[in-house]
Image (spheres, rainbow, N blue to C red):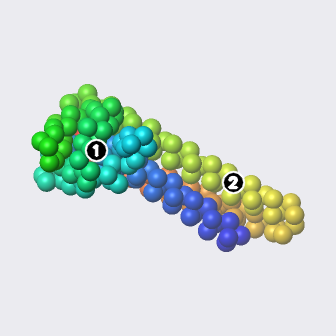
Amino acid sequence: MQTILDDAMERMEKAIESLERDFSKLRTGRASTTLVDELKVDYYGTPTPMNQLASISVPDSRSIAIQPWDRNAFGEIEKAIQKSDLGLNPVNDGKLIRINIPPLTEERRKELAKIARKYSEDAKIAVRNIRRDANDAFKKKKNEKEISEDEMHKGQEDVQKLTDDYVANIDKVLENKEKDIMEI
């Protein structure tokens, strides 16, 4: 029984980590390297993550500096940034690509908050699916007469408590992200 609970807890933890990764890619008013880290750049015909082509830094809270290791990559990096849904315009000075992060409009903040709520709902669905899998595993054990009816119900109660904790955790993470997005 403990194995089923441990597995469920580990998978729910991964759902939260995935949510936090998704949130890190959402643009707030501050500059962050995670905005462009995983952006795919067409590098000699191969889609390559930006962080494998250049060093990315945040010189101040309103800008990102990208220094490609290969001079030939400048144009492709600029194109990738412009094509992305970040709504940012890169400035190339020949040595460095700078991206100024403009302050977000109220409308854009609300849009980002809505996207954040969607991500958190997806995470909750994942947690509920994990709960269902664990409950099914308990039922299967009971049907195979490995555990009693009472043990099955106890296991399902434990899984429900775990689910409630993780859903509350997701709500907390969402609340913090919404605060971050709405902050001017």
- Total marks shown come to 2
Outermost residue to the top: 107
Q: State the residue at coordinates (23%, 47%).
A: 71
* Residue matched to label 2: 133
* Horizontal side, residue 3 vs residue 91: left or right: right
Quarter holding the N terminus is bottom right
* Residue matched to label 1: 73
Alpha-carbon span between mark 2 and mark 1 = 46 Å
Q: State the residue at coordinates (43%, 43%).
A: 46
Q: Which of 150 and 6 is in front in this view?
A: 6
Q: Which of marks 2 and 1 is in front?
A: 1
Q: Which amino acid does label 2 sit on?
A: Asp
**Residue 181 screen position, x and y as percent:** 27, 42
Q: State the residue at coordinates (40%, 47%).
A: 48
Outermost residue to the bottom: 2
* Horizontal side, residue 18 vs residue 31: left or right: right
Q: Residue 148 carries which label?
A: none
**How many residues crowd mark 2 within 10 Å: few (<14), some (14–19), many (20+)?**
some
Q: Which of 161 and 131 is in front in this view?
A: 131
**Residue 54 screen position, x and y as percent:** 27, 53
Q: What residue type is labelled 1?
A: Ala
Quarter holding the C terminus is top left
Q: What element carries label 2?
A: helix
Q: Is mark 1 on a helix, strand or loop?
A: helix
